[in-house]
Image (cartoon, grey):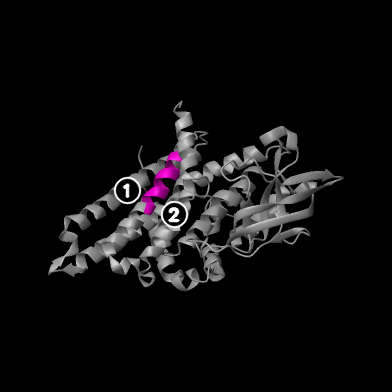
Amino acid sequence: MDFEWTKEECDLYDEVVAFCKESLQHDVAALDAPSEFSRDAWKQCADFGVLGWRVPTEQGGKGYSATLSALLMEAIGYGCEDNGLAFALGTQMWGVQTALLQFGSDAQVDKYLPGSIRGELIGAHAMNEESSGSDAFAIATTAVPDGDDFVISGEKTLVTFAPLADFAVVFAKTAPDAGQWGISAFLVDADTPGYKAGDADEMMGLRTVPYGRVVLHDCRVPAESLLGKPGAGASIFSFIQMWERSLVLAPHVGAMHRLLDQCLAFARERKRAGLAIGKHQAVSHRIANMKLRLETARLLLYQTARQQQEGSSDLMAPALTKIYLSESLVQSGLDAIAIHGGDGYLTAAGVERNLRDAIGATIYSGTTDVQRNIVASLLGL
């Protein structure tokens, strides 16, 4: 499969990297410690066009393909050290906007998508619950029909952007006895009575994007807020997850490239006993492995991106991509700390933050253990 990029695509990549280095050089460490999100950086990304990359031109976006959008998100991962910001952008593109574009009515798209593109509206994806975990469809939240409305009650956990979101895609049971076929999806505004977002949860990594709980208590929404058809929630969730698992980790590839360049520069400059540490096999082999993971991750990412772009329903590729990219950045993060030694363990160097941020990717959008279960099942085990 040919992944040769055109000159125009390469120029776009360079433009994105330059934008990140010029406009997104905020003090990530200062935001990481208190778990603060940079609204200014988000708006700058929107003004640059990031949040419209994969939106069709007739709906106000750039209309970029999935493969090109993934390439440009890789550029963000390389040029921007704020891994939380890069992840947050991906959740909007591949999660929230995908839901709107694929399943939203004309009225819903008109209400939410323009503001999302401009960075003025932030959406959340509210599926996970305390009691469901990896069994995503074992949710307890209900949406009871009442006249022309639905009354939603339940509690969602680990919701990206929960404390700041202007609206949420909420999954709830409309027919509890029908199992996963009784789940529906709703677009719920955060200012709806009965909708309450909790404070941001303290996390190990990705601290520059807020996570939290959403509590819905007798939250009344009109029938027009139903996303797709009644009972289609499980299918909607599965569709969104295929896109997220395939492409939300595209910035990881850029981050792996950034870490490799940092380690190369450090290994050439740092000396021990008069010899650059890169001349020591223990260091050079780690760097060689970082390069190997980077190149294989790229191949897997863009193969999966092209399959998604062509409408593939293959579950294997997204699962393999999710496993490999998440675990590769974790290992490269460990190697980067080992190469930098004591400096790498210090917060001031910024190296350890990449590792903390990377570990989250082995959990969100389906843990790597769940992805291995999917792969094993598809192999007939």
Instruction: Using a 10 Å C-alpha cutoff, classify the residue at mark 2 as few (fewer than 14 neighbours), some (14 to 19) or many (20 or more).
Output: some
* Residue 226 magenta: no
The structure residue drawn at horizontal position 74% and vertical position 34%, both measured from the top left corner, is 177
Instruction: Specify the amino acid type for callout 1.
Output: Arg
Q: Which residues are magenta?
A: 318-330
Residue 270: x %, y % from top left: 21, 68
Q: Nearer the viewer, mark 1 or mark 2?
A: 2
Residue 134: x %, y % from top left: 56, 43
Q: Gap between marks 1 and 2, in whole Å?
A: 16 Å
Name the N-terminal-most of marks 1 and 2.
1
Residue on which the image places disc 2: 359
SS label for mark 1? helix
Residue 8: x %, y % from top left: 39, 53
The structure residue drawn at horizontal position 52% and vertical position 54%, both measured from the top left corner, is 90
Is residue 165 toward the left or the right of residue 226 in the image?
Answer: left
Q: Quadrant of residue 278?
A: bottom left
Residue 293, which numbered label? 1
SS label for mark 2? helix
* Residue 324 magenta: yes
